[in-house]
């Protein structure tokens, strides 16, 4: 699938969330990785390991924020679903699409999807110094529940453990009441959605 580029301004409602585990999306994700800066590739992508996970690890589901009108794939979110819990391992927005509310929109759609798929509890770890991500998570309803000392390397740093529980959110933000995993497109089978 070709990605289209355009200078036309895009609005949040132009974006949809797609499932990246199934073809042709892994190839599009690889193209997306390749056009990120070297610095971001080193910091956030595990390169081929991450792509291999997208293609082969069945509990890992990857989602993309996609704008068919112009920029194509602008971000991805990877999570593992085990039993009735999910753990976010990556969320990343192309730097030119940051600070436009898209990360918050993407995360909200993911949380609705997770609750709809039976995972009301969502965990993640974040570097203590990652103020942008911490603010995004806190604003989205995550709370810090613990610290893993020296969890990260290069540079060595603590990880904060954060948890979101859909059933503890205000009703309007509670994915658990929606129970409709309709926000994701890209055809994972019904069976694999119900882990
Ligand atoms: C974290 C990330 C996904 C946020 O995406 P984004 O689209 O820029 O976020 P949004 O525009 O939706 O912002 C949502 C909130 O996050 C916080 N935020 C986002 N970027 C911020 C920044 N640079 N500094 C401080 N707060 C920030 C703000 O609270 C913001 O709400 P506000 O706009 O009302 O102030 C993006 O910065 C990114 O891809 N970073 C690199 C990868 C990364 O660090 N991932 C997390 C690993 S755990």
Image: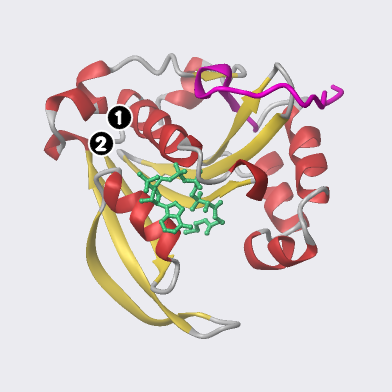
The residue closer to the viewer here, 144 or 72, is 72
Residue behind mark 1: 115
User: Image quarter for residue 1?
Assistant: top right
Does 102 sit left or right of 85 as displayed?
right
Residues packed near mark 1 inside 10 Å, few (<14), some (14 to 19) or many (20 plus)? many
The residue closer to the viewer here, 176 or 91, is 91
The residue closer to the viewer here, 127 or 103, is 103
Residue behind mark 2: 120
Is residue 28 magenta-colored? no
Which residue occupies 31% across, 35% down?
119
Across and down, in percent, residue 117 comes to 36, 26
Q: Which residues are magenta?
A: 1-20
Residues packed near mark 2 inside 10 Å, few (<14), some (14 to 19) or many (20 plus)? many
Q: Secondary structure at mark 1?
A: helix
Please report whichever mark, 2 or 1, sits nearer to the chain's N-terminal start: 1
User: Image quarter for residue 113?
Assistant: top left
Does 37 sit left or right of 20 as displayed?
right
Q: Is residue 37 shown above or below 147?
A: above
Which residue occupies 65% across, 32% down?
21
Residue 123 visible from this viewpoint: no
**Tag of residue 195:** none
Q: Are marks 2 and 1 in contact (CB under 8 Å)?
A: yes
Which residue occupies 22% across, 29% down?
173
Across and down, in percent, residue 46 comes to 69, 61
Which residue occupies 66% across, 45% down?
96
Q: Secondary structure at mark 2?
A: loop
């Amino acid at each position: 699938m070709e990605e289209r580029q355009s200078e036309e301004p895009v609005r949040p409602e132009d974006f949809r969330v797609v499932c990246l585990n199934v073809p042709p999306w892994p190839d599009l994700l690889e193209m997306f990785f390749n056009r990120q800066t070297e610095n971001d590739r080193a910091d956030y992508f595990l390169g081929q390991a991450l792509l291999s996970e997208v293609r082969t690890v069945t509990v890992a589901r990857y989602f993309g924020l996609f704008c068919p009108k112009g920029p194509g794939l602008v971000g991805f979110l990877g999570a593992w679903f085990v039993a009735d819990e999910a753990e976010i391992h990556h969320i990343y927005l192309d730097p030119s699409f940051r600070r436009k509310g898209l990360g918050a929109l993407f995360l909200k759609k993911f949380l609705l999807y997770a609750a709809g798929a039976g995972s009301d509890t969502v965990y993640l770890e974040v570097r203590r110094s990652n103020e942008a991500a911490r603010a995004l998570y806190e604003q989205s309803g995550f709370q810090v529940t613990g610290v893993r000392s020296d969890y990260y390397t290069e540079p060595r740093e603590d990880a904060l453990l954060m948890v979101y529980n859909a059933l503890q959110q205000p009703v309007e933000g509670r994915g658990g009441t929606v129970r409709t995993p309709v926000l994701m497109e890209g055809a994972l089978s019904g069976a694999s959605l119900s882990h």
